[in-house]
Image (cartoon, helix red, strand yellow):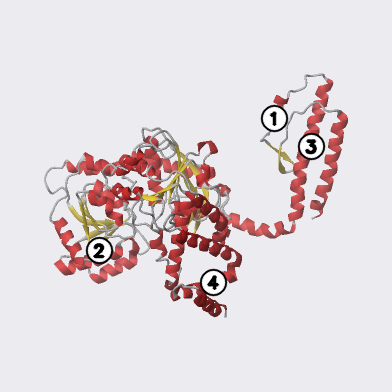
Amino acid sequence: EFRRKGHEDLQSQSSLPSSAHVQISLILPRCFMNRCLPTLALLCSLGVAAVGANMVNTEMPLLRGKPTASNALAGKAMMPQPSSLGQIDKGLSDVADLRRPRNIAIFTTASLPWLTGTSINPLLRAIFLEKAPEGHEVTLCIPFISPDQQRALHPKNVFETPKQQEAFVRDWVQEKLGYQTNIKIEFYDAKFVDSIGSIIATGDMTECVPAHKRDVAVLEEPEHLNWFHTGNKWCDVFNFVVGVVHTKYLFYRSRDAHISPALRSAWTYGWEVLNAWVARAYCHHLIKLSDAVQDFSNAVTCNVHGVRESYRKIGLDFAKRAGPARFKKGAYYIGKVLWSKGYRELVDKMKKFKETTGINLPVDCYGAGPDLDEIKAEVARLGLDFRFMGAIDHADPSLHEYKILINPSLSDVVCTTSAEALAMGKFLLCPTHPSNEFFTAFPNTLTYDDANDADFVKQLQALIDTDPARMTEDVSYKLSWESATERFYDASAAGREEQAAYDKWLAHMHGVAAAGLKKTFGIEEQLALTPHDSQKQSAAELRKNLKETHASVKSLEDIGRKIIVGAGVLGGLSAAASSALHANSLANSAPPAPSSAEIPASPQAIRQTGGLRVPAVATQLPPESARGARELARKARELFAHTMAPASSA
């Protein structure tokens, strides 16, 4: 009845298309029944944000970037030559100028040993910013999740404490780069939330950095970091906040298997609004790695990633080999084994190549993933010559002599493996797509029209019959992290440096709605289960203890409050009485009275009193009479008896 009447009311009162009515009428009953109040808060907040976005679409757009001078120049920054964005540096204020010594804190959503782009690239950015001649002090802030959840994400390496994980990260840097780094590594408590497949912070991430060091914040995946952020407003506590957008979240949300196909369009649009909302609310400026991601109003487009030195060395070494046939192997593909990560396109294109040319070209596939068996079965059914070689590091010597990387993926923002292949001097065959725009300026890149299978066949045949151009120092440098750091400086300087009142209003509204968002997505309870002492207790033990004590805490809440308050006062009075007695005995010996400078202002020591931890008080007091000390002690005894009696009987 609710669904029917709600649908009729919407039809009569709104100009939304009928498909939207159906989606809303299906969503609302379950939301109202399960999470009425938080959902109302969320819907109101999203509604206000959406209306605001439409109202200010021509002046301060939330979802669509206005074509400004910065955005116009931003397209040029995609090219590997020195960025045109650097021209904007003239007259730049100190706030956004990164070409001087700064305290830079980089926050990201993942950490090694989870081998994902948002764990590796922010780490490398931190390392090369710290190495830069400007003399930055760099802190990398990464999540620490419970050992139980670590076993699901990286079962071969599980850490009981953040210190152990930090040691692993530093060892990885030594192994891959050949030197140690001086960056500071801090951890924030986090939880992997299954319902959205992401790591979410459980506390205030800004607290990772001391207040006097909060200068520049680099938010890697700013939308992800802030979906459920309820802590300090980033732009209020940091002088300059720049976000780097890594991931096509709308691509993945539109294919979310947890949501019925009928609702995915509304689901995806909701995430688009939320991403734009938090990115504008919490960042002065955004850098999109490519235009493959959604539009943001305060963003420029520039690839600010590079490749490790080991890949560049391989390419330069191969350039010194004599003769045209420097590469002894043919085509390969490397990436996570998922249909959505390019395998659907790879299978379809190679099937067409076989049908058109009669050549069943061998393709070696490197990687692992959940779709491996299904993809193997499809390849066998089509009779394609694919060999699945398992997961491997792209710099492994067994991959050096491949000539062609075929990367047909459309799900990337900027594909790291494509950059690595170019750095190693290989051909790159990829579709004409915003994610590949940066690579088109390199001589060994060949693109094809994804909608035209004949174009793919033609380009692949051309690569088979030729040899890649030899790598030069100049081209190699443009793929380096040193060059990426220069582009990062330019892109950071190309945007705004202050927030408008509208942006601060968005931040305030999100702060109000964040609690409702947590409840609506059913993750509030999950986040509450991850205190930082996961170093000592597993999540399972904590959950068990919480269940066992929940009923007891409810029934003894009042008594417990009395005990805590009473014990605190008791500790203070007892310490005061003891100090007074001691001071009185000293006074009888006529010592000089202590000056006010000798009295501790706010001691932090903790004393153990009756099994309860209570704050210690000042251990020195002005001389008091023995009578006053005895009176204090008497009151302390009375308070102790009054407070502890109910607890004992309970």
Q: Mark 3 — residue?
A: 574
- Earlier-in-chain disc, 3 versus 2: 2
Relative to residue 63, is residue 160 depicted above or below?
A: above
Residue 285 vs residue 320, the one in the foreground: 285
**Label ID, residue 1:** none
Badge 2 marks a residue whose secondary structure is: loop
Q: Nearer the viewer, mark 4 or mark 1?
A: 4
Question: For the residues marked 4 and 3, what is the alpha-carbon distance in whole angstroms?
Answer: 59 Å
Q: Nearer the viewer, mark 4 or mark 3?
A: 4
Question: For the residues marked 3 and 2, what is the alpha-carbon distance in whole angstroms?
Answer: 79 Å
Q: Mark 2 — residue?
A: 450
Other-residue count near label 1 (Cα within 10 Å), few / some / many at <14 / 14–19 / ≥20: few
Q: Residue at x 60, y 67 (%)?
A: 36
Quarter of the image where one finds residue 338: bottom left
Q: Amino acid at mark 3?
A: Ser
Q: Amino acid at mark 2?
A: Asp
Q: Are marks 4 and 3 in contact (CB under 8 Å)?
A: no
Q: Where is residue 630 shown, x and y percent of the image?
A: 86, 33
Relative to residue 547, is residue 16 depicted above or below?
A: below
Relative to residue 582, is residue 376 depicted above or below?
A: below
Image-based side of 354 in relation to 227, left or right: left
- Earlier-in-chain disc, 4 versus 3: 4
Q: Where is residue 228 shown, x and y percent of the image?
A: 52, 55
Relative to residue 161, is residue 99 depicted above or below?
A: above
Q: Amino acid at mark 1?
A: Pro
